[in-house]
Amino acid sequence: MIETERLVLRDWRPDDWPRFWAGTNTPAVMRWLGGVLDYDGMAATRGRVEACAAANGFCFWAVERKSDGEILGFCGLKRADAPGSTVTGAVEIGWRLREDAWGKGYAREAASAALAAAFDRYGAEEVVALTVEGNTGSWGLMRRLGMRRREDLDYVDPRFGEDLNPTIVHSIDRAAQGEKRA
């Protein structure tokens, strides 16, 4: 569990998933993630997150707002494993928050805490983040976190069409993270 001023990043509980999907499986949230998922897609995503956590000891954590216990989405770390990826095996940071949580600093607060955990708790030397060019909110946050664009690592993900390709990569290493926190 990781606590910030306003949030708790924690392992998933079974009753979190319906609340997570109710807030995040919407056209706006899923715009850059392949679209709204059907039941099978939601089950597959849950299965991947749970398998990732079991295999690595970490994955994308549930993001709970302290003030009211609401599940705002997820944020955390995983081992990159997308098809066609140039960064397979790297520690990847990711986030997905419901639309009514956007613009309030929650994503930055959660991602900053997850980045610190990547370096301090899990011993990462570098952390990558993945998105697409059109998702300006996501790559804007990557840059605010001190990550730099890595065009040399961009790749085509065969699961998605032209509108969601190429996958663009940002990264930050331990030294840069230390400078950002200093």
Image (spheres, grey):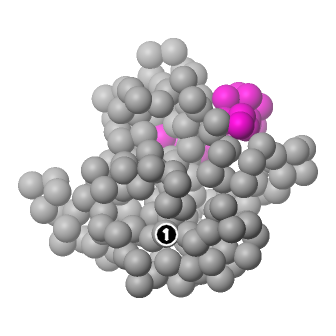
Residue type at numbered disc 1 = Ile
Whether 144 is drawn above or below 99: the answer is below
Left or right: 131, with 172 as reference point:
right
Whether 79 is drawn above or below 77: the answer is below
Left or right: 44, with 155 as reference point:
right
Q: Residue furthest left?
A: 182
Residue 124 image point, x, y percent: 36, 72
Residue 67 image point, x, y percent: 44, 16
- Residue stretch rendered in magenta on the structure: 9-27
Q: Secondary structure at mark 1?
A: strand
Q: Residue at x 71, y 34 (%)?
A: 26
Q: Residue at x 66, y 53 (%)?
A: 33
Whether 106 is drawn above or below 160: the answer is above
Where residue 79 sits, quadrant-wise, is bottom right
**How many numbered tags mark residues here?**
1
Left or right: 145, with 164 as reference point:
left
User: Can see residue 63?
Assistant: yes
Whether 18 is drawn above or below 135: the answer is above
* Magenta highlight on residue 96: no
Camera-side residue of 63 and 149 = 149
Q: What residue is shown with label 1?
A: 168
Residue 175 image point, x, y percent: 18, 72
Q: Residue at x 54, y 23 (%)?
A: 100
Quadrant of the image for the C terminus?
bottom left
Q: Residue at x 38, y 27 (%)?
A: 104
